[in-house]
Amino acid sequence: MNINIKYLIFTLVLLTIEIFIAVFVHDQFIRPFFGDFLAVIFVYCGLCIFFQNSTKIATISLIIAYCIEILQYFKFIEITGLIKYKLLAILIGNSFSWFDILAYTLGFLFILVIENFEILKLFLKLQFETSKK
């Protein structure tokens, strides 16, 4: 199994940003919305360390985020008693929000735009190199 170093670095940078937001930012936009936007990108980059980046991996990342939000809706960590584990409670969260769903969806769309832009750049580069011959 190959490890994609680029996505490993992206994942570590995003993890650092997410931790910083969780610990130091206590506002009404960055922490609740932008943090969730980045969360989908974080999961995507984490999966891309081991799997080739694709729309399928982006979709899986979005589904993971939605599943976590659904767990929040049903108060999963309270019902199971897992709320006493602070790190797990922070990771899963404990309050459902439609704005979180929106943030996850926008993060997913951002992934698609960025990855397709990379594919477009590669295609244009190949076309340019081919036309030079």
Image (spheres, grey):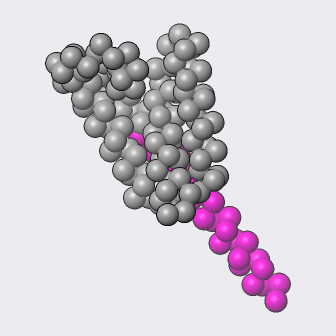
Residue sitting at x 82%, y 89%? 133
Q: Nearer the viewer, residue 84 or 28?
A: 84
Residue sitting at x 24%, y 29%? 71
Residue sitting at x 67%, y 68%? 122
Q: Nearer the viewer, residue 91 or 39?
A: 91
- Which image quadrant for residue 63? top left
- Which image quadrant for residue 4? bottom right
Residue sitting at x 47%, y 59%? 51
**What is the x, y in percent for residue 88?**
36, 23
**What is the x, y in percent for residue 20?**
59, 21
Above or below, comparing residue 118 to residue 97 in the picture:
below
Q: Residue furthest bottom?
A: 133
Above or below, comparing residue 116 to residue 81 in the picture:
below
Query: What count of labels does the image hold?
Result: 0
- Left or right, 106 with reference to 85: right
- Left or right, 73 with reference to 124: left
* Secondary structure that dominates the magenta span: helix
Would residue 109 be visible to someone looking at this image? no
Report the span colored magenta. Answer: 105-133
**What is the x, y in percent for residue 95?**
30, 18
**What is the x, y in percent for residue 116?**
56, 59
Would residue 45 be visible to someone looking at this image? yes
Whether the magenta-drawn stretch holds residue 22 is answered as no
Q: Residue furthest top?
A: 26
Q: Nearer the viewer, residue 62 or 1?
A: 1
Whether the magenta-drawn stretch holds residue 114 is answered as yes
Q: Residue furthest front?
A: 1
- Which image quadrant for residue 96? top left
